[in-house]
Image (cartoon, coloured by chain):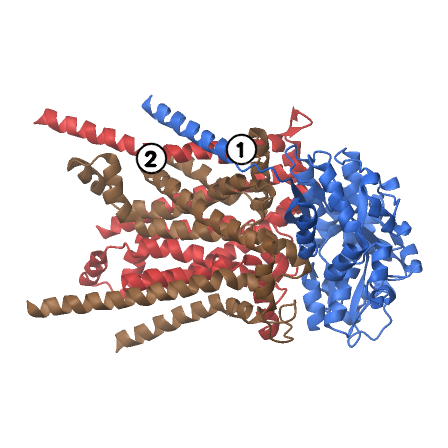
Amino acid sequence: MVNRLKKFFSGTYLGLMLVFLYAPILILIVYSFNQSKTLGNWTGFTFDWYVQLFRTPEITDALVVTLSVAAISSIVATVLGTLAAIGLHAMKRRDRLLLENISQLPMVNPDLVTGISLMLLFLFVGLRDGYTRLLIAHITFNLPYVIFSVLPKLRQSSDMLYEAALDLGCTPMQAIQKVVIPDIMPGIVSGLIMAFTLSLDDFVISFFAGNGVDNLSMYIYATARRGVNPALSTIIFVPVVTLLLIVNLKSIREERNAELQSKKVGLKR
Amino acid sequence: MKLWKTIICIALALALSLSLVACGGESSKVTLNVLNWGDYIDPELLRQFEDETGISVKYTTMTSNEEMLVKLASKDNIYDVCFPSDYLIEKLVADDLLYAINKENIPNLKNIDPRFMDLSFDPGNTYSVPYMWGTVGILYNTTMVSDPVDSWNILWDEKYAGQILMYDSMRDTIGITLKKLGMDINTRSEADVLAAQEALIAQKPLVRAYLTDDIKMELINGSAAMGVVYSGDAVYCISENPDLAYAVPQEGSNVWFDNIIIPKSSQHTAEAEQFINFLCDAQVAAQNSDYIGFSTPNAEALKLMDPSYAEDPTYNPPQDVLDRCQIFQDLGDFVKVFSDAWTKVKAA
Amino acid sequence: MKQTKSIKEKLAKGMRIRRSVFAYPYVLWMAVFILAPMLLILYYAFTNDGGITVENIVQAASWDNLKVLIDSVRFALYTTILCLLLGYPVAYLLSQMKKTSAALLSVFFIVPMWMNFLLRTYAWKVLLSAFTKILYTESAVLLGMVYNFLPFMILPIYTTLIKLDKSYIEAAADLGANPAKTFLKVVFPLSMPGIISGVTMVFIPSTTTFAISQLLGGGKTMLYGDLIYMKFITEQSWSTGSALSIILLAFVLISMTFMKKAERTTSDEGGGRLW
């Protein structure tokens, strides 16, 4: 009884939070079929926004840039940042604190300052390619999020695992790969997801640090002056949610099958 | 020692791969890098230009004149064509960042209304060609405002407390306040700016919000009674909600011009001139203005457009309205006085 | 016997030092892309026409500007507290669920952020003006900030909670602690690393956001991000803009140092009581 009540309350709470998070998304999806350019002013049903979306190469170009930069930068930042966190964790306290503080800089600095200072650096180095500049900038501001989501996992896990692996004849690289990384996987995954999320949304750093390459956020921010295309919001979102739902259902089914299997095994015994 | 070797190796690998990426991807086709305001050109026209000339256009967007300045002033500027406003051109000319356009390459310049040539920010149009223009005024909902809208003072009327929208832009808002007080929109007197600051602080309790693009949404939805907008946006809002009307107050206002320029550092000035000439073609300019909704300075284009445009006083204001409007000038270092005043208004 | 042990110890110690090598690629990246740009900002903040000066800092530290900083920090604090209060239960409940469904459900909490920020915020405007009266008030700004930062609080706490050793909780129960006491004395202290990470990832960036306050707050307050934008871009005064960011940096680094001290004492305390 108590358990059922508990389950009811926890379900309700999670449900309410999801409603809070998804309410604006639903509004956008609805208005992407609205004739008017203005959100909140329903004038009639249309597919025009989607047609326009794929007819404007600027938008599809920006979409390709956004997704590829988000994917590459979040993966590179995750690899670099995870290794960094493992290294930092093994450092002496003083070194670690210093490096942790420096790592916070891209988070502390307003986007504008990060963007302009990177722009100055690229000018100094003579790096002109807009796409490369965009990638470097995104990796840089993604790194602290990866590091700070992996570090707490390392603090939780025991150093003895790594030592034991070494004692059993692993090389440090093997020990990291086979023992440490699986242990901190949830932190790595959440770092990757956060990095990807941040990269999708950035426009200020991208404008200044980039050079003649627009991403979707820059495009949307600039077109807000004349009214944004609401269909833009659904094109990333809908495929992702569909994919997630499929994966989700599949794994729940697998989990249930596994459970049944283990029950059967238990019975046989 | 070994650690340092590793670091150096990685650094070299990094530098090498970066330089490879930076050098790759050169093609024989000329690409024009264009920097413009968002949604400020009909994308079909870009395709048409590419088809006609074989030049490809790489179109990127920005959100303010000053952001553009940061880009153009940078030594590694890559842009070939940009669309800055009047006061920024003054600054760009002063900083020697613009290329003097060869007018022989732009025969379509004859289409531009002589009223909009040879303006104060670029005498003789040495560096710039007008692209779009308009005024700043009050857009109001006729079902919610019964008083005549002919003065900026209505934005200070307590009757409309909580229904007034101001433009969230330092130059525009301090500018119209200076006009309301009967002062010069380009004043260099600290006392004038201080007076405007006081007036804006006094007005703040009446203001629903300081917005930019969202003013349109609020007025179309009827969430507010009046707001400060650009004439081009007013044209769009009135087409969405016929209850709305636009007025340029008697005290005068700001008239603005967005222009096409070529940065001095451009490597493709001939192609850039070709692009400018294309945009000045009457048919092209008409289609473009129809798409954007902002007023074209191209007299021949206006003749090709639906007559309703020429007759619309919002789109094509009569000369007496223009006579009482001023063009913004570059403020130079005096901009600090403006921005200090604006900070005080916003933090009040 | 003694000899072999010390060799082993030495070896282990050697391996421990070697582990910090994994941070070196990052340290290099950091030196080039974080520290070098930062030096440029420091250069602008402390020079004027080529000469070294503190004048920019003194000017930037005016009372008007500090008031703006205080306002921004206040908003950031409220946002962090609300995110923690709302996000912790989500993370906790997720951590109690079956592993695979929890992992996927946790992704569902961040996916809304894959819609463009500006569009999300516009959608809130539509919702708030249709159903509430709070549009263009401080509450609307807070709502927008909590909405946008919540996932960055949930994820790190969730990842630490799933790792929590269930035997501690059982042990606490066996020793007679009621669920509330178990939570306060065992679960909460043990999730501290995740909380610290979450707070870092919410508090620090939220001190400098400004787009939300412009869109949902109706631009009626000026936040520190606005101020820096104005100095850098509108005034094109890079020295004042840099000085303002240095002040912010100093403030954030000092407050984070205090938080780390607090973290050390609480986690020591938690650990001490466990055993």
- How far from the left and from the top, in percent, is residue B148? 87, 71
Is the residue marked by circle 2 packed among few (<14), some (14-19), or many (20+) residues within 10 Å?
Answer: many
Q: Which chain is brown?
A: A
According to the picture, the residue beneath numbered tag 2 turns out to be C22
Q: Quadrant of the C terminus of chain A?
A: bottom left
Farthest residue to the left: give it: A269
Chain letter belonging to callout 1 = B
Q: CA distance from mark 2 to mark 1?
A: 30 Å
The percent coordinates of residue B118 (x first, y second) are 89, 44
Tell me which amino acid carries mark 1: Cys
Left or right of B224 in this view: B12: left
Looking at the picture, which amino acid does disc 2 mark? Phe
**In this rendering, which labeled residue sits more in front, label 2 or label 1?**
1
Q: Residue at x 35, y 48 (%)?
A: A188
Q: Quadrant of the N terminus of chain A?
A: bottom left
Which residue: 90% across, 59% down? B321
Q: Residue furthest top?
A: B1
Helix, strand or loop at disc 1?
helix
What color is chain C drawn in?
red
